[in-house]
Image (tube, helix red, strand yellow):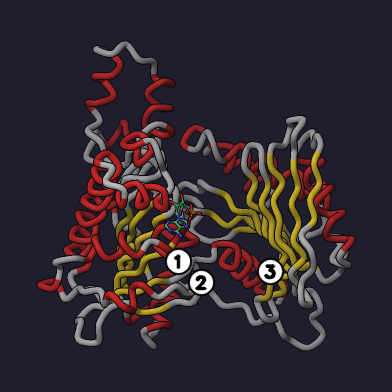
Amino acid sequence: MTGTTATATGTAAGDTASRVLVLNSGSSSVKYQLLDMRDSSRLAAGLVERIGEQTSRLVHTPLGGGGGDKRERTGPIADHAAALKAVAEELAADGLGLDSPELAAIGHRVVHGGLRFSAPTVIDDAVLAEIERLVPVAPLHNPANLTGIRTAMDLRPDLPQIAVFDTAFHTTMPESAARYAIDVETADAHRIRRYGFHGTSHAYVSRETAKLLGKAPEEVNVIVLHLGNGASASAVKGGRCVDTSMGLTPLEGLVMGTRSGDIDPAVTFHLKRVAGMSTDEIDVLLNKRSGLVGLCGDNDMREIRRRIDEGDERALLAFDIYIHRLRKYIGAYYAVLGRVDAVAFTAGVGENAAPVREAAIAGLEELGLAVDADLNSVRSEKARLISPEYARVAVAVVPTDEELEIATQSYALVRGVNA
Ligand code: AMP
């Protein structure tokens, strides 16, 4: 179902199970949302952080029926099992217990699904084993995702547990975009290729962009720019991803908050041979001490803009490098798609930073691209166009909603399975 994500309606007579719990499990954190898929509304949301430390914290926000006050728990939460138990208690206190027959499924964000998973998947032992097999290509993320899944399965073994993969939307890429130009046997032996990430966001935003244009996803070609702390671009042709900027790992592509994005791979040999750095040190340098933070010490675009306004030259150079890379990808994906109907900005920077959108599109009128300054300065949580009417290509700001996408895909799957 990749690229043609079904929309769940969930209102069939007699069908009471309409809630989906979405879990995003990190190594020391769990983010969650409980949604009612009858109207895609949010019933509760929260976060457990610093799991395994003395200073763990759970923040729970009731959102259903007019909402309620945010609640906070502090103190040690030993592991993911304890975290999920605490979440279950908070939900039960709102009358939303995980033992409720209204819970239809638990949807798990799984970062790496390799080539095998091109669609949301009901988790069983074989699926767990395959996610485990992918740990070498996602050493930071897949183990944490697995821990979250196993914990939830222990809690509700009877309930469908669905894996929604960050890579799934990108499995439609042609080999010409997905393969690196290295020795084929070596690449295949080690499963080295472009997988891409942020797939639920690219899927959701490309579809919402089509909706904004009043068209079906199959009718439009969109360049999606997911600019958060992590950042990626994708070229989406008629609802299917044909190229994306992240690669084997989320390190490739755009300049990000702390990641370098594209870099000559020989830089790593050089750092090893000449600077005497270890592989782990280089990994940390490129993933944690590069990008905007490496260039100017800050990774928050608000702070960078504030510094630029004060005349800070390092912040300005960081901004210029960020924008230069972004424009290169817009140009590249324009050529990949041939015809572009829309460029869509999303995620923390894309949704909020008007100067980034302005600078990314400036001077591209020959490509049919322009940004209207007044529309660009409007702050809104709604999807909107920021291009002037005369522009041939729409430029849009489309807030992403990865939790809703995970819930929608999970619910559509269980409804299909149960039908
Ligand atoms: P995300 O990873 O999508 O949550 O995005 C986080 C990033 O969005 C932050 O690191 C900031 O750089 C950026 N951001 C969030 N709010 C704003 C804002 N109001 N203006 C500019 N950038 C913002």
Q: Which of marks 1 and 3 is nearer the N terminus?
A: 1
Q: Which residue is at 22% across, 40% downward?
A: 181
Nearer to us in this view, 150 or 231: 231
Q: Which of marks 1 and 2 is nearer the N terminus?
A: 2
Residue 334 on image: x %, y %:
20, 65
Q: Do the residues labelled 1 and 2 touch (CB within 8 Å)?
A: yes
Residue tagged 2: 5
Identified by mark 1, the residue type is Ala
Residue tagged 3: 414
In the figure, residue 79 lies in which quadrant? top right
How much space separates mark 2 and mark 3, taking CA atoms?
A: 13 Å
Q: What element carries label 2?
A: loop
Identified by mark 2, the residue type is Thr
Q: What element carries label 3?
A: helix
Q: Relative to 292, is 128 on the left or the right?
A: right
Which quadrant would the C terminus be assigned to in this image? bottom right
Q: From this view, report whether residue 6 is shown above or below residue 184.
A: below
Q: Relative to 201, is 55 on the left or the right?
A: right
